[in-house]
Image (cartoon, grey):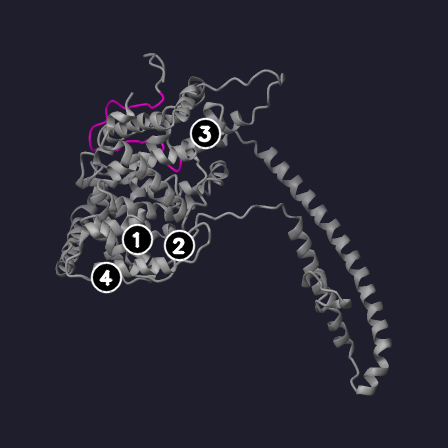
Amino acid sequence: MSTDGNKKQFWKRNAAKVPGSIQHVYGAQHPPFDPLLHANLIKAGNKPPPATPGKPKKATTFQEFESITSDAWDVGDDDDELLAMAAQNLNIEVVMETANKVIENHSKQQERQRQDDTTELEQREDDTQEEAAEDEEEDEEEEEEEGDVTSPEVSFASQSSPYTDGRLVKSHSEAPIGSPKDAAGEHAALHRQRSLPHRPPVIPLVARMADQNTSGTPAMTEREASRLDKFKQLLAGPNTDLEELRKLSWSGIPRQVRPITWKLLSGYLPANAERRDSVLQRKRQEYFGFIQQYYDSRNDEHHQDTYRQIHIDIPRMSPESLVLQPKVTEIHIDIPRTNPLIPLFQQASVQEIFERILFIWAIRHPASGYVQGINDLVTPFFVVYVFEYIEEEVENFDVSSLQEEALRNIEADSFWCMSKLLDGIQDNYTFAQPGIQRKVKALEELVSRIDESVHRHMQQYEVEYLQFAFRWMNNLLMRELPLRCTIRLWDTYQAEPEGFSHFHLYVCAAFLVRWRKEILEERDFQGLMILLQNLPTMHWGNEEVSVLLAEAYRLKFAFADAPNHYKR
């Protein structure tokens, strides 16, 4: 990054910030929520190739990228103002004229296709009637002897059998079934279906958050059933052996016992089984005591900025926040993993729960206050603890069907476990976020040792690790992975000593090197940044996460106790 004092800095800082105030974080939105930035990237990406094919393409430098996006990173910009500015670039008349032409052409094509289908169907009906008449003449004598005269309806039905004319029809839609009108409708529908462009099967973001593998293996294999039994036996004892529980949990925790296991490994519940109920009751009462004492102050002058930011961030967890922003919706259509578009999080009662959790945590931790991105860290706990009260899948579950006591328990448990997590990484969110700065620097040094080609490639095109890895550290890779993968990842983080604060570094290094081939194929700054902020992990499942964790463990084993190994 340029060191020129007169040059505008890439990240603008407000010198008036004080500890405890809201700190805007690069990449903490889903992803950087800026139509101007994306519009510039799109325009840059659609530029025609140079007129001279023999002339090599000039690499886009970081300074050029900064010059066209310097205003896009202004912390003072408001989303509504940015959207209004982006909307000014649209010519409504041109858009409407183009849309009308598309609709008109489509209607003409449909009409021509309908006429072709009708002609083809009439010809097929004529052929069918001729064949039926011939068959009736041939079989007339036999039918009279047997005393079974075939009615026209039965004869027609026999012709519509899949075995018409002694051959197997490929599908029922190829033969006329029922009335000619029905046949025409089915044939037209089939033709329209075939005329649609082929799209590869994709897993939408509302894909199951329960344990699943991309290979499609059954949810409960014999090995998994055996592991579940081991968990149940270990948890059934009067005093749970936490060290043994960590060993079992490292390779993943079965859904049925994940809630209590997370509570034990996070330190929220004691190992002694007799004390658990009393501890839960006391901690839940304590949390709602905070609600009663502090939540009404959210509109006070010294708290209203914090609550306003939380109130802004929570709706971004649902697709409704993108409805009025067509540009942004279009850009984000292929990267839904960065935004948990799960119907569960669209419910008003769920968003209110998240607002209470984040506000209480923020005012109880004035050294950091609320930082954008912390709202993501609530979601895995919330989903896991909902599973404690339901058997079905959680994606479309209506939480209002739960009893009030169950909802209160889920809210309080999510608050305390998130607090335990953040206690170990709070320097990620204090003033200037020194924890993230150190981890990003350590990641750069580590990658330079384990894959020098990737490191030099990013240096060549002036890609700073802070520009993409900041979000990895700030959100614990939650914007890079589907939520189901995050839950599996956190199984291991809970089992690892200092999993969230230390082991996460090696997971990020393994994650970066995992995309080595794709990174080396990109030949400019913009291409690298778009790739690194939109890595194709939407189809990932437990298998991919397990491989990632195994590689991270290998790196930790090699470098954790010998930090000089990754220092030049």
Q: What kind of residue is marked 2?
A: Glu
Q: Is residue 26 visible?
A: no
Q: Is residue 520 visible?
A: yes
Q: Are marks 2 and 4 in contact (CB under 8 Å)?
A: no
**In the displayed structure, does residue 164 sit left or right of residue 133?**
left
Q: Is residue 1 above or below residue 394?
A: above
The alpha-carbon separation of the residues under discs 2 and 1 comes to 20 Å
Where residue 148 appears, as percent x and y from the top left, is 78, 85
Quadrant in the picture for the N terminus: top left
Q: Which residue is mark 3?
A: 519
Q: Which residues are magenta?
A: 10-33
Secondary element under disc 4, as helix, strand or loop, is helix
Examine the structure image and report whether residue 14 is included in the region drawn in magenta.
yes
Where is mark 1, residue-wise?
A: 253
SS label for mark 3: helix
Q: Which mark is residue 395?
A: 2
Structural distance between the alpha carbons of marks 4 and 1: 14 Å
Image coords of residue 452 (percent x, y) = 38, 24
Q: Nearer the viewer, residue 288 or 167?
A: 167
Residue tagged 4: 233
474 and 362: which is toward the camera:
474
Nearest to viewer (mark 3 / mark 2): 3
Q: State the residue at coordinates (43%, 34%).
A: 515
Could you tell me the amino acid type at mark 4? Gln
